[in-house]
Image (spheres, rainbow, N blue to C red):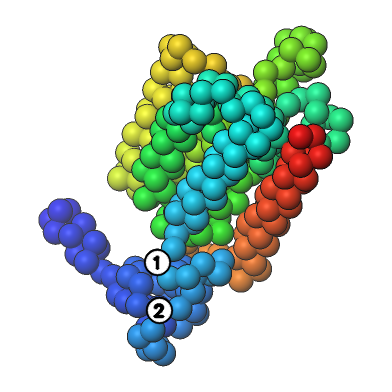
Amino acid sequence: MTEDRERADERDVKQCGRCQAWIPGVATMCAYCGTNDPDKRISSKPLRSPIGLPHGVTVVRAITAVTAVWFVVSVWLQIASGHGGNVAEAVVTGRGLWHGLWFAGVAHAESIRGGEWWRVPSCVFLHVGLIHFAVNMFSLRSLGALGEPLFGGSRFLTIYLASGFASAFGPELWHHVIRGEALAAVPPQAGASGAIFGIGAAMTAFMLKQPTGRARQIGFTLAWNLAMSFAVCFFLPIPISHAGHAAGALVGAAMGLVAKDAFSTRISPESRRNWWAAAATLSVATLVAFGFAFRFAMGAM
């Protein structure tokens, strides 16, 4: 009986009359195009998502594309600065890529305190070699397959960027504030790991607060995978910012506790606008940071 009910629930979907996306049958708003009347057929032509992305372009794909471009920029800056070295090794493993990472905006506690705020957003899109990039983007795609449809584009992007920005301060908080080490001893930070841990923690917190056993089971599975990923990082023979991971996860979990799913009828229009505004603000800050990083690189070389 229970299995039959679950199968019926899984079939209880419909197509939005505006953008043709599949949504829950009880939904009164489409999370993909934003219409408040998904039962009214307007056009069979795909329109745009609530955050302005063309139909078929997801936030995860957009993040991956921007991250790939900024990785290429860091390699180009490495070569243009006259510190090319073994370019192939630098591209694959990240060895010898320090100058490119520095010019492209790696997070550095002393520099950030000195006014180079743009290192906070830009470091989230930097990666120490192609292997680092591939591992993080694979993890993002795996989590995004569930997380982006669950939260919707604006909430997903806000959680990702906010967690990533917070992870930039994780090393300073742990090494300088808590352990009392000199600010110069705080290790630099680069990579999307903190943002990805934030997405995983947000999904975990969201699922665990749900009233159904099935949702909580998914939440416990996510929590276990998140804990195992965090633990495995301690045994990898490469420099890893555990403090950055923890900071991103804490911010993501906090946002997961307050966020509702994309199909919730309890979300007010004002709340939706607030999430959209947050996503837009953080995105603009990131783009401006890229501009500051490029200007810094051109002036320093």
Dot 1: few (<14), some (14–19), or many (≥20) neighbours within 10 Å? few
Q: Nearer the viewer, residue 273 or 64?
A: 64
Asked if residue 38 is positioned above or below residue 210 in the image, the reply reads below
Residue 198 visible from this viewpoint: no
Q: Position of residue 204 (x, y in %)?
A: 45, 39
* Alpha-carbon span between mark 2 and mark 1: 9 Å
Q: Residue at x 39, y 22 (%)?
A: 228
Secondary element at tag 2? loop
Marks 2/1 in contact by CB < 8 Å: the verdict is yes
Left or right for 189, reference 1: right
Q: How many marks?
A: 2
Q: Quadrant of the N terminus?
A: bottom left
> Identity of the amino acid at label 1?
Gly
Left or right for 229, reference 192: left
Dot 2: few (<14), some (14–19), or many (≥20) neighbours within 10 Å? some
Q: Residue at x 60, y 51 (%)?
A: 158
Which comes sooner in the sequence, label 2 or label 1?
2
> Identity of the amino acid at label 2?
Pro
Q: Position of residue 194 (x, y in %)?
A: 56, 33
Q: Position of residue 91 (x, y in %)?
A: 49, 31
* Residue on which the image places disc 2: 46
* Residue on which the image places disc 1: 56
Q: Residue at x 45, y 83 (%)?
A: 37
